[in-house]
Image (cartoon, rainbow, N blue to C red):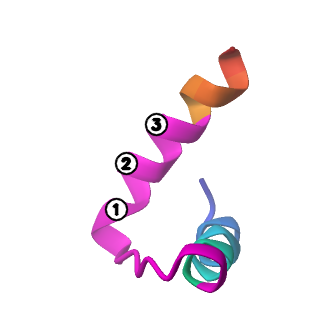
Amino acid sequence: MESEIFAKFRSIIHREAGIQLTDEKKMLLENRLRKRLKA
């Protein structure tokens, strides 16, 4: 996942859920999104 895309997801997640994701969570988010997109 490109840094710009991660930054957009991070912004949306923070705005909608109040969850602050650090750069270390990039792989976690990528893996969870991949599972959702496969379903």
In the image, the segment drawn in magenta is 15-33
Task: In this rendered view, identify the residue nearer to me: 26 or 12.
Answer: 12
Question: Where is mark 3, residue-wise?
Answer: 31
Q: Secondary structure at mark 1?
A: helix
- Residue 4: x and y in percent read 68, 75
Q: Are marks 2 and 1 in contact (CB under 8 Å)?
A: yes
- Residue 2: x and y in percent read 63, 62
Q: How far, Cα to Cα, is label 3 from label 2?
A: 5 Å
Q: Are marks 3 and 2 in contact (CB under 8 Å)?
A: yes
Quadrant for residue 21, please give it. bottom left
- Residue 22: x and y in percent read 34, 77
Q: Amino acid at mark 1?
A: Lys
Task: In this rendered view, identify the residue nearer to me: 32 or 27.
Answer: 32
Q: Earlier in the sequence, mark 3 or mark 1?
A: 1
Q: Quadrant of the C terminus?
A: top right
14 falls in the magenta region: no
Label disc, if present, on residue 35 of the rendered structure:
none
Q: Secondary structure at mark 2?
A: helix
16 falls in the magenta region: yes
Question: Where is mark 2, residue-wise?
Answer: 28
